[in-house]
Image (cartoon, rainbow, N blue to C red):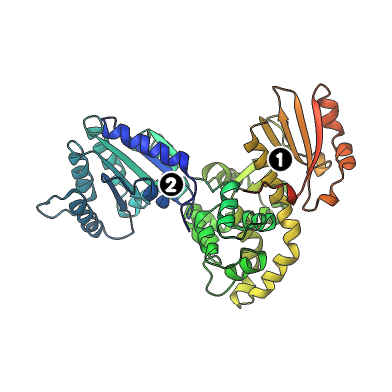
C-alpha cells in the first residue's frame, strides 16, 4: 500500500531538520500506538536526505546493538572507527561529536526499550545532549510505541530526560478522507465499505495495509481475513496492550471488555466487577490514553453525567468480539464469531456512523462545539449536537443507517430542554444517514 497523508508531520520534521542543519539543534519526541506508522512516516520524510540515520532499538545485548549501529555509521558517514565500541553511550556521543562538522538527523526507534538494556542510559543521553546541543548541528528524534513509558520519560519531572524534548509529535490514525482515498484507489469505494472499514480497524495504517492485499473490502471478506487460525488480528489486542498495561492487564482487559460491550458508565462496570475501579479508569484515560470520557454537550465541568468509550476503533472491535469469545477461538470455531458479528454489525456500526458524521462536521470548520447529548438515565439521547457560539447557531441531528428511519418530529420532541435553553439561537434539525458521507470525486 502506498504512503498516505502525514503532510503536516512531514513538513514539521523537514523544518526542524533544516533548522538543525543551520545550527539550531533540536530534540524531537514521536509517540503513537503500535502499527500507527511512525517508522513509515520517518522513512518517508527523510528518504531523500543524505544526512539521515535510523537506528532500531531491538532487545538484544548492548554489545550486539553497538556492532549493528557501528556498521550503519561507518557506511553512512564513510569513516573508519578504530577500536571496539561496546557501549551505547560511547557510540551516541561519537555520533554527536561528528555533528560538529556534519549536520545529521538521527532516529532511535522503540527508544523506551533502552530500559531493558540499561535504565541508566537515559541519564547518560541527557548528559550527552546537554553537552553537545549548543555547538553542533543535529536533529535528534526518538520514537516509541509504549505511550505511557515514552511520556513518563520526557514529562515526569523525576526523569533525567524531563524537559529535553523541544517538540512532541503524536501520530494519530488516518482521518476519514484518506480511508476514502485508499478504498477509491483499490476500486472498492462505497459508503458501506467505508463505514465497515472505519468501524473495524479505524485509520491504523498497518491494518489497512493488510486488508489492502485482499480483492474485496466488504464485511464478509474482512471477517474472513481477520478470523482464522493464521490471522495476525486474533492476538493483536494482547500484542498492543499487555506491555503497556503491565501486571494488572487482566483487570484492565475486563474493564475494556465491558466498555466495548456497552457498559459505559463507572457504576455499570462496577456492578459487574463488584469492586471499585476509579483508579483503573483514571489510568486508562490519563496515563495510557486508551479510553476517553464523554459528557453531554454543554454539561458543566463538575457534572457526574458521563460515559466512557475506547478511543481506538480496532481495540473496541477486538474486545467486543475477539477477546470476549476466546473459547471459540481456542477450538477454532471462527464461524461462530463471524455469525455473531454479522448479526450485530448494523447496530454496532451505527455508533461509528455517528462518530464519522461528527468528524465530518468538525472538518467543515462551521462549529466550535460538537458532541452528543443525553439526560438522566440516558433519556432524550441526541446523536449529534453542533454549536457555533459566534453566530448563535445550533444543529441538532439524528443519525441512522437508512434515511427512511429518521424521525425529525421525534428529534424535536427529545430536544425540548435544549430548545428552551437556547431560545436566542437559530436552531436547525437535520437527519444524517449512510448516504451523507462525503464521496471523493
x and y percentages locating residue 225 in the rendered image: 58, 69
Asked whether, in this view, residue 320 is left or right of residue 432, the answer is left
Residue depicted at x 18% and y 48%: 77
Q: Which residue is mark 2?
A: 149
User: In the displayed structure, would residue 392 be above or below residue 381?
Assistant: above
Residue 391 position (above or below residue 411) = above
Name above or below for residue 400 compared with residue 321: above
Residue 306 has which mark? 1
Tags 2 and 1 in contact by the CB under 8 Å rule? no
Closest to the observer, 314 or 74: 74
- Percent x, y for residue 261? 70, 57
Q: Quadrant of residue 15?
A: top left
**Residue extending furthest toward the left:** 82
Q: Residue at x 40, y 51 (%)?
A: 39
Image coordinates of residue 371 in percent, x first then y, are: 70, 37
Q: Is residue 261 visible?
A: yes
Residue 232 location in percent, x, y? Answer: 51, 67
- The local crowd at label 2, few if under 14, some if 14 to 19, many if 20 or more residues have their Cα within 10 Å, is many
Instruction: Determine whether the residue tagged by mark 1 lies in a helix, strand or loop.
Output: loop
* Residue 280 in view (yes/no): no
Q: Is residue 72 left or right of residue 363?
A: left
What is the count of numbered marks?
Answer: 2
Q: Looking at the picture, tell me which residue is in the foreground, 129 or 19.
A: 19
What's the distance in space between the residues labelled 2 and 1, CA to CA? 28 Å
Of the pair 197 and 31, the residue shown nearer to us: 197
- Residue 236 got which mark? none
Mark with earlier residue (2, 1): 2
In the displayed image of the protein, which residue is found farthest to the front?
Answer: 441
Give the residue displayed 65% in from the left and 42% down from the top: 359
Q: Secondary structure at mark 2?
A: helix
Residue density around tag 1, few if under 14, some if 14–19, many if 20 or more, within 10 Å: some
Amino acid at each position: 500500500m502506498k504512503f498516505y497523508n502525514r503532510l503536516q508531520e512531514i513538513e514539521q520534521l523537514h523544518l526542524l531538520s533544516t533548522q538543525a542543519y543551520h545550527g539550531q539543534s533540536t530534540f524531537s519526541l514521536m509517540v503513537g500506538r503500535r502499527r500507527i506508522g511512525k517508522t513509515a512516516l520517518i522513512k518517508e520524510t527523510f528518504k531523500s536526505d543524505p544526512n539521515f540515520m535510523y537506528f532500531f532499538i531491538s532487545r538484544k545485548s548492548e554489545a550486539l546493538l553497538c556492532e549493528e549501529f557501528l556498521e550503519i555509521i561507518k557506511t553512512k558517514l564513510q569513516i573508519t572507527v578504530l577500536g571496539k565500541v561496546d557501549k551505547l553511550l560511547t557510540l551516541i556521543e561519537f555520533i554527536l561529536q561528528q555533528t560538529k562538522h556534519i549536520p545529521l538527523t538521527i532516529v532511535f526507534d522503540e527508544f523506551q526499550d533502552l530500559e531493558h538494556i540499561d535504565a541508566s542510559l537515559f541519564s547518560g543521553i541527557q548528559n550527552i545532549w546537554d553537552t553537545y546541543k549548543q555547538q553542533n548541528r543535529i536533529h535528534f528524534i526518538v520514537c516509541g510505541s509504549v505511550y505511557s513509558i515514552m511520556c513518563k520519560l520526557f514529562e515526569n519531572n523525576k526523569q533525567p530526560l524531563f524537559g529535553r524534548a523541544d517538540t512532541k509529535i503524536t501520530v494519530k490514525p488516518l482521518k476519514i478522507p484518506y480511508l476514502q482515498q485508499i478504498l477509491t484507489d483499490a476500486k472498492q469505494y462505497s459508503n458501506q465499505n467505508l463505514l465497515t472499514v472505519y468501524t473495524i480497524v479505524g485509520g491504523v495504517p498497518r491494518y489497512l495495509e493488510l486488508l489492502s492485499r485482499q480483492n474485496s473490502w466488504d464485511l464478509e471478506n474482512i471477517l474472513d481475513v481477520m478470523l482464522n487460525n493464521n490471522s495476525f488480528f486474533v492476538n493483536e489486542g494482547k500484542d498492543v496492550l499487555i506491555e503497556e498495561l503491565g501486571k494488572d492487564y487482566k483487570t484492565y482487559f475486563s474493564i475494556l471488555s465491558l466498555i466495548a460491550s456497552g457498559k459505559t458508565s463507572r457504576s455499570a462496570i462496577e456492578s459487574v466487577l463488584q469492586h471499585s475501579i476509579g483508579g483503573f479508569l483514571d489510568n486508562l484515560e490519563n496515563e495510557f490514553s486508551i479510553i476517553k470520557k464523554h459528557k453531554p454537550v454543554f454539561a458543566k465541568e463538575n457534572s457526574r453525567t458521563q460515559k466512557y468509550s475506547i478511543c481506538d476503533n480496532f481495540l473496541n472491535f477486538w474486545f467486543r468480539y475477539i477477546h470476549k469469545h476466546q473459547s471459540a477461538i481456542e477450538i477454532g470455531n471462527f464461524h461462530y464469531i463471524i455469525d455473531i458479528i454479522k448479526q450485530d454489525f448494523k447496530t454496532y456500526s451505527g455508533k461509528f456512523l455517528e462518530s464519522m458524521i461528527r468528524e465530518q462536521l468538525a472538518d467543515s470548520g462551521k462549529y466550535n462545539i460538537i458532541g452528543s447529548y443525553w439526560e438522566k438515565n440516558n433519556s432524550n439521547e441526541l446523536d449529534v449536537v453542533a454549536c457555533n457560539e459566534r453566530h448563535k447557531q445550533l444543529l441538532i441531528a439524528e443519525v441512522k443507517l437508512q434515511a427512511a428511519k429518521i424521525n425529525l418530529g421525534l428529534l424535536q420532541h427529545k430536544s425540548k430542554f435544549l430548545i428552551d435553553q437556547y431560545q436566542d439561537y437559530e436552531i436547525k434539525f437535520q437527519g444524517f444517514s449512510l448516504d451523507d458521507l462525503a464521496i471523493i470525486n
